[in-house]
Image: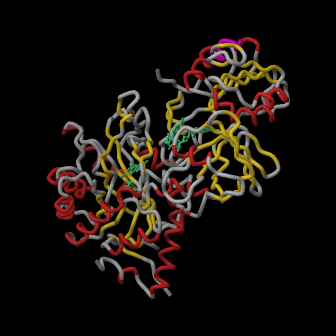
Amino acid sequence: MKEGYRKVTICSNREIATDIYEMKVKGSGILGDPGQFYMLKGWLGLDPFLPRPISICDISDDKITFLYEIRGKGTGIMANLKALDKIEILGPLGNGFNLNSKGNIAIISGGIGIAPMIYTMKSIDTPIDFYCGFRDEVYYIDEIKKHANNIYITTEDGSVGHKGFITELFVPEKYDIVMTCGPIPMMKKVVQMCKDKVPVFISMESRMACGIGACLGCSIETTWGMKRVCKDGPVFSGEEVIFYD
Amino acid sequence: MIDTRVKIAQVEFKNPVIAASGTFGFGREYGEYFSLSKLGGISTKGLTLNKRGGNEGIRIYETTGGILNSIGLQNPGIDDFIQEELPFLEKQDTVLLANVGGSTIDEYIKSVEKLNETNVDGIELNISCPNVKKGGMAFGIKSEIAYKVVLEVRQVCKKPLIVKLSPNAEDIVHMAQCCERAGADGLSLVNTFSGMAIDIYSRKPVFNNILAGLSGPCIKPIALRMVYEVSKAVNIPVIGIGGIMDYKDAIEFIMAGAYAVQIGSGNFINPHICLDIIDGIERFMEDEGIKFIEEIRGVI
Ligand SMILES: Cc1cc2nc3c(=O)[nH]c(=O)nc-3n(C[C@H](O)[C@H](O)[C@H](O)COP(=O)(O)OP(=O)(O)OC[C@H]3O[C@@H](n4cnc5c(N)ncnc54)[C@H](O)[C@@H]3O)c2cc1C
Ligand SMILES: Cc1cc2nc3c(=O)[nH]c(=O)nc-3n(C[C@H](O)[C@H](O)[C@H](O)COP(=O)(O)O)c2cc1C
Ligand code: FES
């Protein structure tokens, strides 16, 4: 039987860029594959009501790192938690990236979509080209530099790296496999660029309630019919996802 | 020794806690977290005669104390359910209610006929579905229309028939009485309340269908009032549903007259919530010296 929500202790929770937080928690036997996520509840009682899905950013020795952006109530409460506070987590959930990938690999992230790609990058043996796009402030760059073959950075305001969108730097022809996570329009663009050239895997986002596949709240349309982002994903092959305009 | 068994429409439930339709899938996912045989019962995801993909756009939206949902009855259809899901559910030692939806009376009837031939323990008829012949207004709004649906389904249904009421009914007590007269063996209430949300930046409704169903703790006081009023007005067992988050909520519904309760949205915030509620009810009965649930049922 799988374990339900369990309390873990926060080791650190710090703001690494404006409204971007890195939280490390400790608990015995913490597991997870790159691309998988946890449901998090950083509050007591029923407000907010639903737990929030957050990707595994990194895992080592009973410690798990979450990287999150303050978007609203839930992430706002999480940002106020301190070391030694408790948080409840359920997971690991969903299906992650296939790591047996060989050849030249590109990772493309947009904004906070960088979170699952850090652990993914670290788990792949072959050299990786990491393309990361940001709005203005950049984060986790040093961590990427330590592991990636090449790093390409864009900011929309041009404050760091190339000015513009990350897809402007990406050349699909150079790669045997592409993995991406970020805003839907960015991932849609990446899938279009890779079409008929290189297989691409995308980590989808959807509003969730149960997180375990029972409520069908997170369903998306695919070429295989309706699929649950939380259980059948969040990682899907780019060709199978049907994007709406 | 306490005895938590309850009997509804000749079906015995080992305890009064049932997982609510649409929040528990076909049990498989929660079955990874606990043995489903511990449950009093399971009501399946709403089934329709043919497969449905459900609604496009946002399907889940949190609101204070609950959620709005617009899943749109995504389900594999009755045949696929019987073939792919029922064999697993049959193996669980718990009462199985097949929750049936439809957009015409004919569709309800065909679905129930197929389920007659299976081992499901009972039918839970969801009359909150939009009625295509009546411009999409739910069957469960007007008592006369609901009466007609239940009467016709009753004629073909060989299983115990529980009718699930919508709180959006014009007059919930009259609705309940009409369903009883039409031959329902039991009633379950409530389904979700019609609600909505607006994205003020795009100046558009959050949901493609504009309206969505509200559930969770925010509906509990109204659901409890409806269960109380309906229990007093009918002679068939009532199953209470709406915002139940712990054993205290469950006991409140039982004291208001419910024979059993269903747990919906609560499953989303704790996959073990049904077990916690079953344990809580047992402890409460022990502490309060209650031997049978009947002792506290409808004491209000
Ligand atoms: C599989 C998965 C992995 C994710 N991983 C991360 C991560 O590593 N880091 C990170 O910062 N964010 C991640 N997100 C997005 C994150 O879950 C939302 O930003 C967060 O739930 C917002 O909650 P809130 O209370 O702050 O915002 P509110 O706007 O108050 O949230 C209200 C409701 O909407 C939902 N919601 C709001 N925005 C989103 C969104 N963009 N996607 C899904 N649900 C949303 C919330 O879960 C909640 O139910 C992930 C989402 C998914 C589906
Ligand atoms: C995501 C979701 C899906 C639902 N699907 C169905 C359904 O298919 N059929 C049905 O009769 N009720 C459905 N319901 C209603 C619930 O069974 C229940 O009546 C309602 O949510 C109120 O209970 P709660 O406050 O405990 O959630 C659904 C509710 C939710 C939240
Ligand atoms: S969140 Fe419930 S099925 Fe995915």
Residue B212, given in percent of the width and then of the height, sits at: 35, 42
Judge by depth and name the residue closer to the eye, B94 or A210: A210
Judge by depth and name the residue closer to the eye, B224 or B47: B224
Magenta stretch bounds: A165-172
Is A168 contained in the magenta span?
A: yes
Is B271 contained in the magenta span?
A: no
What is the quadrant of residue B171 in the picture?
A: bottom left
Q: Residue at x 54, y 46 (%)?
A: A74
Q: Residue at x 41, y 69 (%)?
A: B250
What is the quadrant of residue B294 in the picture?
A: bottom left
Q: Is residue A190 above or below residue B95?
A: above
Q: Please, which colouring scheme is shown?
A: secondary structure
Q: Is residue A7 above or below residue A80?
A: below
Judge by depth and name the residue closer to the eye, A14 or A143: A14
Residue A191, given in percent of the width and then of the height, sits at: 61, 19
Q: Residue at x 41, y 39 (%)?
A: B51
What is the quadrant of residue A15 in the picture?
A: top right
Residue B211, given in percent of the width and then of the height, sits at: 32, 40
